[in-house]
Amino acid sequence: MDEKKLKTAVEEAKRFLDRVKELQNEQKITVRYFVGEKEYTHIPSCPKESGAVRRASMDLSRALAALRKY
């Protein structure tokens, strides 16, 4: 197994997890409101953070694919 490819995959995995934590922190801010007796909860969509998660996921997938190649 190539050491450089392995190191890259580990770095991408860490970056992916960091982006996921950022997204989770942004989504913890929920807004609850009532209409009549019914309660609604709004979780923000956070497009910047969710885009960063998708990009990190794609980069991780590519690093893992490169790791599997001989």
Image (spheres, rainbow, N blue to C red):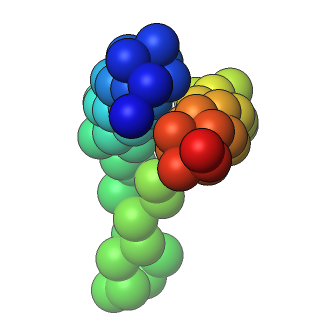
Q: Position of residue 57 (x, y in %)?
A: 58, 42
Residue visible at 52% across and 39% down in the picture: 67
Front-lying residue, 21 or 7: 7
Specify the quadrant of the image occupied by residue 48.
Answer: top right
Specify the quadrant of the image occupied by residue 66.
Answer: top right
Q: Quadrant of the C terminus?
A: top right
Please indicate whether residue 28 sits to the left or right of residue 54 in the image.
Answer: left
Front-lying residue, 3 or 45: 3
Please say whether residue 18 is visible from this viewpoint: no
Residue visible at 44% across and 25% down in the picture: 2
Front-lying residue, 66 or 26: 66
Please say whether residue 10 is visible from this viewpoint: yes
Please indicate whether residue 23 sits to the left or right of residue 32 in the image.
Answer: right
Q: Position of residue 46 (x, y in %)?
A: 60, 36
Above or below 61: residue 39: below
Residue visible at 35% across and 77% down in the picture: 39
- Looking at the image, how many numbered discs can be counted on the residues? 0
Residue visible at 40% across and 65% down in the picture: 41
Residue lying farthest to the bottom in this orientation: 37
Q: Quadrant of the N terminus?
A: top left
Q: Position of residue 51 (x, y in %)?
A: 70, 35
Specify the quadrant of the image occupied by residue 53.
Answer: top right
Q: Position of residue 69 (x, y in %)?
A: 62, 47
